[in-house]
Structure formats: C-alpha cells, structure tokens
Image (spheres, rainbow, N blue to C red):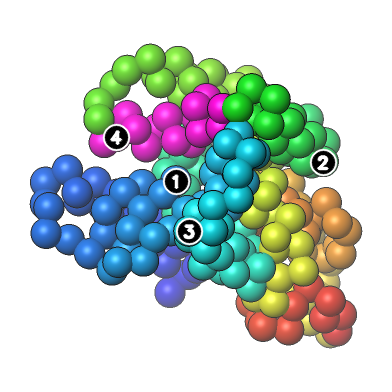
Amino acid sequence: MKIKIFRRLIQIIALIILLLPIWFTDLIWYGTYISAELAGVDLTDPLTALEITLASKTIWMPLITSALPLTIVAIIFGRIFCSYICPLNFLLEILPVKRKKILQTRILPLVSLGIVLVLSLILSVPIFNTASPVFAFMRMMIFGVGVEIILLALVIGAAFIWGQKIWCRTLCPLGAIYGLLGVKRRFAVTVDKNKCINCERCEKICSMGTSPLKKSFEDALTCTNCGDCVDICPKKALNFTFNGLNDKR
C-alpha cells in the first residue's frame, strides 16, 4: 500500500474521531486537537500549553504535563500532526490547487511563532487559539459555521493565489513548534545514495517545498514526514527509518 493511501485513511479517521463526540457521549475520547481527554489522560498541544502559560504568567503543572505526550511524539516523529491529523492540512491537500513554489522563505513560521508567543505574553490572551484557521476549522466542524469562516476563506484564497500550502509553509506557528521539536527526529526519510539517481522527483512532489536529499535546518523544520517523496521515488532510494536525520549513507 502506498504511504499516501495509508495517510489518507488516517486523515479521514482523524476527522471522524474529531466529530464523534457530537453524536456519542460514552466515549474514551473528548475534545479537539487543541485539547482533549483520551482514556482519562489529558492532552494539550504544546503551542496551546505554551501560550496559556505565557498569557496567564503562571506555570500550571497539569497543563505542562498534558503537553508532554504530544511533545514526545513530535520529538520522535516530527510534524506528523500536520500531515496525518490536521484537518486544515487535509482540506488544503484536496483542493484543486497547483503546488506553486513561490514565497518559500521557510523560516517565516518561526517569526510567526515568536510573534504569537510575545503577543500572548503582552496581551494575556492565547493569540493563536483565538485567531487560528486550524482551530477555527475544527470549531466550525463541531459547532457549525460562524465568523471563523472568514479565517478559513483567507487561507483558502491564499492557497489559490500563492500555492497549495502557503499557510503551512510560511505562517503556521503550530507547524513551526512541531517542526522545532522534530528537527532532530528519529523517524525520518533517509536516502540510499547507492540507489539515488538524482532525478529530483522527490523535490517536485513535495507540497512543502522540501528535499529529502538535503540536510538543512529549513528542510528538517518544514518536512512533515508525509511520505510523498518515498512513494514517488522510482528507484526506492527513499525510506522511513529510525536512524534519524543525521544518518548519511
């Protein structure tokens, strides 16, 4: 089975899981991908935990503890939230939009992350949670269409103008923090240089504008471990391994 088919199945399952509490109450899962409870274990995404900590100017250990599971997952597997779970990424992937490769300044999400954290501290409000197209889309699916549709429309409009994942590549602070956590991830795409013919198909297929052939900080930060490059390689020179990004065969 191609990785993309497997990933699509996971994305659809993730959407179903997100919507299940609307119809069923006796579940082991409650919440959203911002914050949830799974089998009695509290889960919070690391950006939300950091924003709330800065906004409240208080270190609340239950909140910090609830962010640890997803933080550990990101350290090991990188930005798999983006490619396998994030509903906005799923929407952007199925839009009939070409993968334009302009505005490729991939360091910008770090700037966005810094601005979000500083504003959360100064204004005492978790900024990204309040005005995030990722969470706005989730709220719309659960609670119905509201003013959040404006944020979603802006992201979709930007995709048609500047490229399929312009939001993910150049602005998303949630992707940035997962990228930072996973920049030295253990589970990563590695290249068998004995098989690679430098056809560059892996670079052309990547919707995030990265290359598994490079070892730059920007590529490690931006890669979502989606596996499209593994699927497209004609010589099977690319594979997921637990050797980490430092493996250079």
Can you say whether 83 is above or below 100 in the image?
Answer: below
Helix, strand or loop under label 1: loop
Q: Which is more foreground, mark 1 or mark 2?
A: 1
Is the C terminus in the top left, top right, bottom left or bottom right quadrant?
A: bottom right
Helix, strand or loop under label 2: loop
The residue where tag 3 is placed is 62
Which residues lie in the magenta part? 125-142
Q: Earlier in the sequence, mark 1 or mark 4?
A: 1
Q: Amino acid at mark 3?
A: Pro
Can you say whether 158 is above or below 231 in the image?
Answer: above
What's the distance in space between the residues labelled 3 and 4, CA to CA?
A: 28 Å
Residue 85: image x %, image y %? 45, 54
Residues under numbered marks 1 and 2 in contact, where contact means CB atoms less than 8 Å apart: no
- Residue 34, labelled with which disc? 1
Q: Residues within 10 Å of mark 1 (few under 14, many from 20)?
A: some
Q: Amino acid at mark 2?
A: Ile
Marker count (numbered) = 4
User: In the figure, is residue 198 to the left or right of 33?
Assistant: right
What's the distance in space between the residues labelled 1 and 2, CA to CA?
A: 24 Å
The residue where tag 2 is placed is 107
Nearer to us in this view, 14 or 42:
42
